[in-house]
Image (spheres, helix red, strand yellow):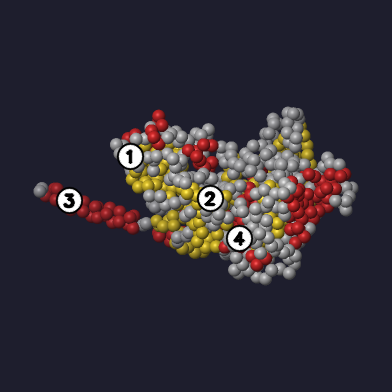
Amino acid sequence: MSRKFMKMKIQLVPLILFFLQMDNLLCSEERSTYIIHMDKSFMPMAFSSHHHWYSSMLQSVNSQTSPKLLYSYDNAFHGFSAVVSETDLETLKNSPGFLTAYADGPVFPDTTHSYKFLSLNTAAGLWPASQYGQDAIIGVVDSGILPESLSFRDDGMTNIPARWRGICQEGEQFNSSLCNKKLIGARYFNGGVKAANPGVTITMNSARDESGHGTHVAATAAGNYVAGVSYFGYASGTARGVAPRARLAMYKVLWNEGSYESDALAGIDQAIADGVDVLSISLSYRRRELHDNPLAIAAFGAREKGILVSISAGNRGPGFATLLEGIPWAVVVAAGTIDRWLAGTVSLGNGRIITGWTLFPGRAIVRNIRLVYNESFSSCSTQGSQINQSSRILVCTLSDIEFDSVKTVTMDPSVPYVDARIVITQDVTELRSFTYQRPGVIITPSEGREVIEYIKSSDNPTASIDFQQTVIGAEPRAAPAVADFSSRGPARSYPGVLKPDIMAPGVLILAADNPDSLRAQIGVTYLGSDFTLRSGTSMSCPHISGIAALLKTAHPNWSPAAIQSAMMTTASVLDNTDEPIKDSGLDYRVANALDMGSGQVDPNRALDPGLVYDASIQDYVNLICSMDLTSEQRRTIIRSSYNCSNASSDINYPSFIALYDSQENGTKLTKEFRRTVTNVGNGPTTYLVEVETPRESTIEISPMTLTFAKKYEKRSYTMTIRYRSYSPSETNSGAITWIDGSGKHRVRSPIVVTTTVSIYE
């Protein structure tokens, strides 16, 4: 070896050692997830939001490990979670406003999960402020209740409030001892059923629930804590209602033998007499006219007694004006998705892992099985006889047209020689209520292309599938999104008030149910479950009922209108990626107020809304008097004790709707609204208005500043909108937001410009 080469080798040794040391240093800088608490008062004025502030902090960390922001928090606490190295964390500790940090630990998903998605927590906000709804009474008008469910135990409940006037009505398989400090009342009403069907035999002549619907609704609103529940291994955790310490009273009005308006009216009427604080009504009737609608009539009586009424918007979406019951004196609730993905993990033989959708109710063993795909029999309706070998995973494509038949075909137990299926479809959200009789997973078209390419390029393509997976987060879809089935406004019964009012979780909500009802099937075996996933505005409605009960407990002097206003003006219009909420029923375009009302309810912000739009019962009377009704029709709603000397269609509502006749395209129109807001914040304050103007409209606000000297003081303003009519069913949206000097309170009211809807269409 030459001397020159030896010298070069000696010189390279320190350099190699340096790079090895650097490599070891970088390798030792493993990243972990940390939760970092911040003092938000340190946020510089240059940042428009705390999210941007946290992002900037991480970007300023000059690190080769690329810190990653996961979530920013502004409800349970102020701070964020991020994937950082220990060196990065030490740098962040020197940032202004840093309080503390700790490593993220493992958690188990809670069932319903919706309470967590709504940021309800034990540390701060509406739950502790209301003592979890203690002593609020929620009346549920539905199909009855299963009193033995663990969700209705009275562990931790105090004595029943002395103001309660209800009873536990005995009946078939239901005696008075089944009520307790949680389920404080139960009644049933079937006179209408019997009158319509003389001689009919009621199969369960009591408040006992056969279908499970009422049990699920009641448990969602105010179920007690139940640990270790799941839906066949999915969404496992601890179940609880939105107001877990509130009381429940069930009024059974839905029957297997039929459901009638008279029974519903009787149930609501009795609930009012018994002394409930909130009425949760996940029912819908075809009657559109307010003076004929039992829900509208009964809801007015309830509001007159100071009871907030929460009603489901209906499941007729996603079409324009599919909402029938636009009751101005009730909270009409739309349904949205949550950030929980019930999954099956597909592991391909080439190492690629795909998270798909499944609700197969078992831990099937699908390991290293050959994948089969051929365009000549790629349809999900292909019979297994075309596959000449056993132990196969069939990859098939499902079109929108085929969707209706997939339930009976995709997992048909009569199909031989197929161990499992991987179904490729464009919109996985449509399959959330899918019944899996055989193991199967749903994946997207882009993922499907990967699977097919792998099959074509491999001599022995195989895959394994793991079931009973639960994933929380923004992937594969941001949440919330408006559920496709949720009915859209404007309301056909009365389009003059913007409906729906608000959106709450209503897709795949896990709560107590009747275990004897069919919930799943494997082959020819039918399965039941004590806790079941259900979807519908029937599920979103009790979320609002529970939140209303919490607010009623925290603010016992607030009227139902004030509670409704607090929920509406603090609702969020952003999803968990800080983007505008989308509409899953219309190709995920940006949703508007006809889809979701004021937005997704935010319980903790509703606790301290700053301002509320209050309304007395006389205000609702004035609204009814302004409607095109006869004297008799008016009296069916408001009775004869009120007069119509001050008829006005401009009620003090937390939202605005400007209507036009779709046949007068291009007509220029003007509408003026007058509103009065009440300061429910502490002490003097000043609010400035921020305006989002609908397309091709102008808005004037007078005055543009509202100054309050003390709490409970009122101030009024007018909003004048100049707009023009458009083509049929076109909608243009905007909003006005009153913002206080500190920026803490943002009181937002949506504005919609849209066409009138005839109730006879």
Q: Examine the image and state in which quarter residue 320 appears.
A: top right
Residue occupying the far left of the picture: 1
Which is more N-terminal, label 3 or label 4? 3
Left or right: 638 as drawn, with respect to 363: right
Q: Amino acid at mark 3?
A: Lys
- Res 408 visible: yes
Assess disc 4: are there few (<14), some (14-19) or many (≥20) residues with their C-alpha within 10 Å of its C-alpha. many
Q: Amino acid at mark 2?
A: Arg
Q: Amino acid at mark 1?
A: Pro
> Can you tell which of label 2 and label 4 is closer to the viewer?
2
Residue behind mark 4: 223
Residue behind mark 1: 461
Mark 2 → mark 1, Cα distance in angstroms? 34 Å
Q: In this rendered view, identify the residue nearer to me: 190 or 75.
A: 190
Residue behind mark 2: 519
Residue beneath the point at 54% across and 50% down:
518
Tag 2, which secondary structure? loop
Tag 1, which secondary structure? loop
Which is more N-terminal, label 4 or label 2? 4
What percent of the width, then of the height, locates residue 601?
A: 63, 52
Which is more N-terminal, label 3 or label 2? 3
Residue beneath the point at 46% across and 34% down:
381
Residue 9 image label: 3
